[in-house]
Image: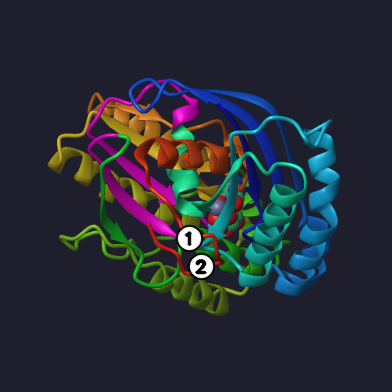
Amino acid sequence: MLILGIETSCDETAIALIEAKGGLKKPEFKIIKETVASQIETHRPWGGVVPTLAKREHTKNLPLLLRQILGDPKQKIDLLAVTIGPGLDPCLWSGIVFAKNIHKKYLPKAKLVGTNHLEGHLYSFLLEQQAAFPAIQLLVSGGHTVLVLMKSVKERKKLGETRDDAVGETFDKVARMLKLPYPGGPEIEKLAKKGNSGSINFPRPMNKSKNYDFSFSGLKTAALYYLKDNIKAKRQNMAASFQKAATDVLIYKTIRAAKEFKAKTIILSGGVAANKFLRRELSASSRKIKLKFLSAPIKYQTDNAVMIAIAAYVNHINGKKHKLASQPNLNL
Ligand code: KG4
Ligand code: ZN
């Protein structure tokens, strides 16, 4: 079936057209066309995403991107999927209103469905080879840090999540302390390559707790105090030591969950999964306990519409429906 995905939950406007087949047993996806318009330059002077500016950019970009993706807007499409949350409310609405308009005007035969942005990240691994189940998935983005047990593509259970800041948010905040430009995550990764990750012993919050929750606000505060007390601290050492502390906690809990639930695969997803240090370390730790490691290519970790179309396919096969209205706090 042909699926058109639309994503506008934060600062990327994205549309993708994919072909999906195989059901949940052997899902196969072919990306026909995809495009992402990044708003980094718009928000950079403000040091973070400004929701009203983001909405304005989405509204301006969506018709341009649609023209790039669908030569003929009246093409046959089976599913028209749009992100309904979680995300910034004005941004979500711009996508939903656009999807409703093109549905009415050009694609009345397509089924219009809402898609959970987190399910987009969660199912992005289906772009890769098949996972062996049960699997443990670590989903790390700007707004979420979640550990999920997947008994199959269909059946999942949330094992834990962050109790305060998400790990991506923490990368962004520490980057700001180091006077690095927005978005901070990739900048920390770049700077960390030049530093010594063992030079500062930052805390590994909740590493010893028995549950699968995370907490990153203590690590953020530790970084802030370290900078205050060590004005001449080498920024590259700060970046490397912070990145190491944050990834250590994520990996420790993921591996512990994999052992407890006898997982066969470890899956990594979300914007922070674009971090090569985390990918390398988690992949090495998975191999050490003889587990398969799966993660979609880096390009599909940060927000995109291919993952929205994939999640729509999974939900369509499952018969799962989301209300077509903005739900900024939608959960997994
Ligand atoms: O999934 P995503 O694009 O948007 C949300 O759903 O939140 O994730 C964005 C987050 C930001 O916090 C960004 O700094 C972080 O992912 N990020 C990274 C890297 N690339 C993006 N964090 C660390 N290293 C990276 N290379
Ligand atoms: Zn995201």
Q: Tags 1 and 2 in contact by the CB under 8 Å rule? A: yes
On the question of residue 207 being in view, the answer is yes
Whether residue 132 appears in magenta in the rendering, the answer is yes
Q: Is mark 1 within 8 Å of ligand 2?
A: no
The residue positioned 32% from the left and 35% from the top of the image is: 153
For the N terminus, give its image quadrant. top right
Whether residue 253 appears in magenta in the rendering, the answer is no
Residue 158: x %, y % from top left: 27, 54
| Real-space Cα separation, disc 1 to disc 2, in angstroms | 9 Å
For the C terminus, give its image quadrant. bottom left
In front here: 134 or 47?
134
The residue positioned 33% from the left and 23% from the top of the image is: 25
In front here: 245 or 319?
319
Q: Mark 1 sits on what residue?
A: 323
The residue positioned 73% from the left and 69% from the top of the image is: 47
In front here: 287 or 199?
287
